[in-house]
Amino acid sequence: MGRTKIFIRHPRTLFATEDAFEICKHELATRIQAKYKGYRVKGEYQRQREAATKIETCWRGLQARRERERRAWAVKVIKKFIKGFMNRNQPVSMDNSDYLAFVRQSYLTRLKDNLPKSVLDKTIWLTPPPIMQEASVLLRKLHTRLLVRKYVRAISAQQKVQLQIKALTSDIFKGRKENYPQSVCQPFADTRISEQDINIKVLQLICPEGIKYSVPVIKYDRNGFRPRFRQLIFTQAAAYVVEEAKIKQRVNYSSLKGVSVSDLSDNFLILHVTCDDTKQKGDLVLQCSYLFEALTKICVVTKNHKLIKIVQGSVRFDIQPGKEGFVDFKSSSESMVYRAKNGHLMVVSPHNPMHTT
């Protein structure tokens, strides 16, 4: 064996060597290829890793700079907020302008989610900060007008008439009669007695005048004050007190001087009638469960809103011309109606603590 050549003495050795080479050359080529490809891929991998490291470094640096800027901005905002809070009661300036703007925006946002849903919700309104006092008053007025507008547009013609009648009742009795507040939530009816419940003979007599309202009442006799169940019917021309198939008394509106009620929580009314003839019946003492409704209806029918007189203590009424009687009113723990020893009709009603003057 020399430096560059191999000298083979026997041919069979050459043949064996060539056969071994033929067998191993594919494996050797594969190893060489693997080493070369590994070297190439390793270099590419190292270049990609260096590139990825540089990209990550740049991205992390960018994020860090953004976080630093965000924190610096947050520090400035917090400082400005604290400074604005300390100067919140001072005139608007550079120190508190941003804080006051935040307060306004925060109040309006909370107010938007807590607005009253009804005109009657007068207590549901957020307390405004000092800077929003004037704006809050204006917004509340605007919102109330909006709710009223929506309510007015939604009510029907029948409801509108009902409200007008209720307004008339309020003008007459609000703050003047004890049990009026309890009647506010009770809707008025067109009538309390249907035409089918009125005797046909009575109906034939008064129907041409046009029945406007009817209600069951208790009439007290002028002498002795004995209670009797009656029907009180208002027509276009007169008021009728009816007992089954008989008209007991007809009161023309032209002869009706007024209607007296007490300021307590009873449900009595006295119809004062002009008496020129001794044969003519006197005033009517009635008890009505639908007092405010009946009194309002008679004011509407007669077109005289000053017909009702609210009195204190006692009411004088005419039994007949030249003879008078009295109804005394007082409040107690129980409700009673009886004839007193002095001959007066005593009406005792429970005291209502809701009475306002």
Image (cartoon, helix red, strand yellow):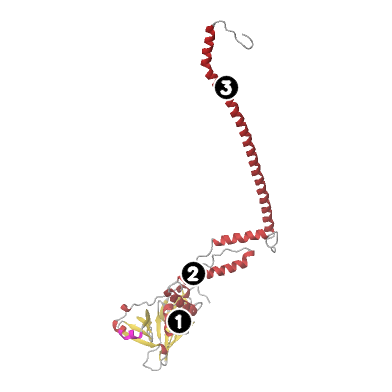
Q: Which picture quadrant has residue 210? A: bottom left
Report the span colored magenta.
Answer: 204-209
Residue at the spot of label 2: 150
Residue type at tag 3: Ile
Q: Earlier in the sequence, mark 1 or mark 2?
A: 2
Corner quadrant of residue 218: bottom left
Residue 227 visible, this angle: no
Element class at badge 3 = helix
Q: Dot 3, crowdedness within 10 Å: few (<14), some or many (≥20)? A: few
Question: Callout 1 environment at 10 Å: few (<14), some (14 to 19), or many (20+)?
Answer: many
Mark 3 — residue? Answer: 32
Viewed as shown, does residue 35 lie left or right of 209? right
Residue 274 or residue 8, whichever sits in front: 8
Earlier along the polypeptide chain: callout 1 or callout 3? 3
To which residue does mark 1 refer? 261
Q: Main secondary structure of the magenta part?
A: helix
